[in-house]
Amino acid sequence: ILSLYLSILSLCLTILSGVNSYVFYFIPDKMTWTEAQTYCRKHHTDLATVNDQTDLDELLKTLPKGFKSNIWIGLYRMNAKAPWVFSDGSSSLFRPWISGQPNNSGGYQHCVYTDPDGYWNDWQCTDPFAFICYGELLAAGTVQVKPFNLVVSV
């Protein structure tokens, strides 16, 4: 039997379109806000940036069914008088706070989590929670090429 092995470089085309700014990744491992930021920057782009309700809806879709815990996002401030900014340095006026929040209870609540319903709360950065990272979407119509080898036996 004649065996012929052909290695063919194929293109796997992924055409991305849509209105969302980011791709979100749920990470179930519980980490402090700073540990989560480090993880996201190493494996993705950064902790989640949420610019509007559409982004928040997409973020919440990444949660496993029935998930009921708090999740770190990228919103934080350096101290009680500093402005809220996202980990990537961006800012947004969209902030669906839980009623009465942010309150900086105890004077150390400089990081933000979202609950599974999409409402935000300021919290101390040292508590471990699951978290959401984001990655940049390619521009609509951009082709992402992923090579792979195809082996054919004859």
Image (cartoon, grey):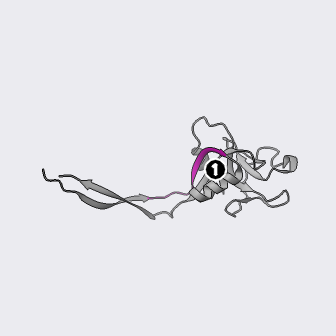
Q: Quadrant of residue 8?
A: bottom left
**Residue at 70% of width from left, 44% of height from top?**
128
Farthest top residue in view: 66
- Magenta stretch holds residue 24: yes
Locate residue 75, reporting x and y percent: 72, 55
Q: Nearer the viewer, residue 129 or 132?
A: 129
**Residue at 27% of width from left, 55% of height from top?**
151
With 96 as the anchor, is 63 left or right in this view? left
Q: Is residue 54 visible?
A: no
**Residue at 85% of width from left, 46% of height from top?**
105
Locate residue 7, reporting x and y percent: 27, 60
Locate residue 115, reporting x and y percent: 69, 42
Q: Which residues are magenta?
A: 15-30
**Residue at 52% of width from left, 57% of height from top?**
18
With 8 as the anchor, is 17 left or right in this view? right
Q: Nearer the viewer, residue 129 or 16?
A: 129
Q: Main secondary structure of the magenta part?
A: strand
With 121 as the anchor, is 62 left or right in this view? left
Characterize the local packing of mark 1: few (<14), some (14-19) or many (20 or more) Cα atoms within 10 angstroms. Answer: many
Locate residue 38, reporting x and y percent: 65, 56
Three-letter amino acid code at the position of disc 1: Leu
Q: Which residue is mark 1?
A: 56
Q: Is residue 128 visible?
A: yes
In terms of secondary structure, where does tag 1 sit? helix
With 39 as the anchor, is 11 left or right in this view? left
